[in-house]
Image (spheres, rainbow, N blue to C red):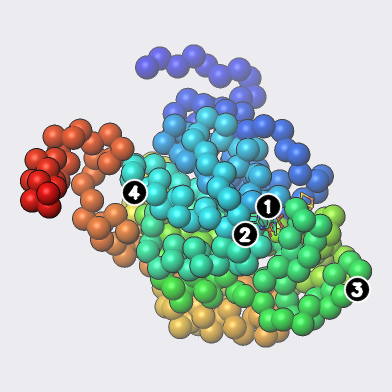
Amino acid sequence: MTMTAPPPGKKLNRIGLELQAYRGSKTTLCAGCGHNSISERIIDAFYEMGVDQRRVIKLSGIGCSSKSPAYFLSGSHGFNAVHGRMPSVGTGAMLANQKLIAIGVSGDGDTGAIGIGQFVHLMRRNLPIIYIIEDNGCYGLTKGQFSPTADLGSKLKNGVLNDLPPIDTCALAIQLGATFVARSFSGDKKQLLSLLKAALAHRGTVMLDVLSPCVTFNDHEGSTKSYSYVKDHDEPVNEVSFVPSFEDIAVDYEPGSTQEVTLHDGSKLYLKKLEEMYDPTDKLSAMRRLLETSRRGEFATGLIYIEPDRDDFMTLLNLIDEPLATLPLSKVRPPKAALDEIMESLR
Ligand SMILES: Cc1ncc(C[n+]2csc(CCOP(=O)(O)OP(=O)(O)O)c2C)c(N)n1
Ligand code: SF4
Ligand SMILES: [Mg+2]
């Protein structure tokens, strides 16, 4: 393929596309909503990784967050499911065509309330999907009621205090078996972009909880999901640098202070330890850190837990590589004749 030189100022990625090609429709969310910044980082990550959008399926449920797939990757497939039901639709899509790259965007209400049953079983299966929770601690679309991730004692705009403890979606995902669990903040461009690019190189369930303030209903004094609270209480567990397999970059790091993790496609993650004892490959260490930070009213961010080598759901099911969606009838097992025979025997 011959490629013409890009217009001045326009940089093409490794598949010859400019950033613009990864955008979607113009956002209809409120100006300043954290969800918009997350869409921007998704656009950056897919562009920088040179992903072919025709292989991508965008999935979501219902909520302001779940509207956001319309605002990125206009060239990919998409399915906007009903409230809290994105995991089962995503599971079906991946079983039908395991060559897809699945990215799901949900909200803390969509995941933690109506969708919690589906979320729990998705996390157990290690289905290859990037599952993002745009976490604002409230139901933005229905005017800001507390969601299950709202912190104990946090205050609504009208002064009502939350008297229930929160669900920590990262702790839940780790306990249930997700193999890449991270937390970030919509305002932390660098950390979020590195995590999203690493997520694209991981084969298995990525659960990425992104604190994403709702400027209209949950950005006031007394909220623990406001821009100012999250900025002041962000406690990164590591500094995440990502080197994709197609870039031959030698990284100079001090052994002992940086942990190197090789991902499914050969890409590398370099995790600069900000704390001597933190090891994101150790479940106990990860769970302890989440509990300790939440007790202090802080948010642990960065790569919280990773298990790069566990078999994904398709491998467990022993599926053939060829997508079921395009498998010719002659290759389907058991063959049609065997099924006809069984039906005949039941007459
Ligand atoms: C079955 C059903 N129940 C309730 C609703 C009303 N509803 C729409 S969005 C939403 C919650 C959205 O909260 P979240 O997932 O946190 O998204 P956000 O708007 O905060 O981004 C609710 C309860 C619905 N659409 N469908
Ligand atoms: S209501 Fe809140 S969550 Fe919804 S678009 Fe506006 S700022 Fe974002
Ligand atoms: Mg919400």
- Marks 3/4: CA–CA distance: 46 Å
Return the disc, 2 or 1, that comes first in the chain's sequence. Answer: 1
In the rendered image, which quarter is residue 18 located in? Answer: top right
Q: The residue tagged with tag 4: helix, strand or loop? A: helix
Is residue 195 in view from this perspective?
no
Circle 3 packing at 10 Å, graded few (<14), some (14-19), many (20+), is: few
Residue named by callout 1: 63
Q: Is mark 1 within 8 Å of ligand 1?
A: yes
Give the image location of residue 122, x and y in percent.
44, 62
Q: The residue tagged with tag 2: helix, strand or loop? A: helix
Residue named by callout 3: 159
Q: Residue at x 58, y 50 (%)?
A: 82
Residue named by callout 4: 95
Q: Amino acid at mark 1?
A: Gly
Q: Residue at x 55, y 47 (%)?
A: 81
Numbered tag placed on residue 110 in the rendering: 2
- Marks 2/1: CA–CA distance: 7 Å
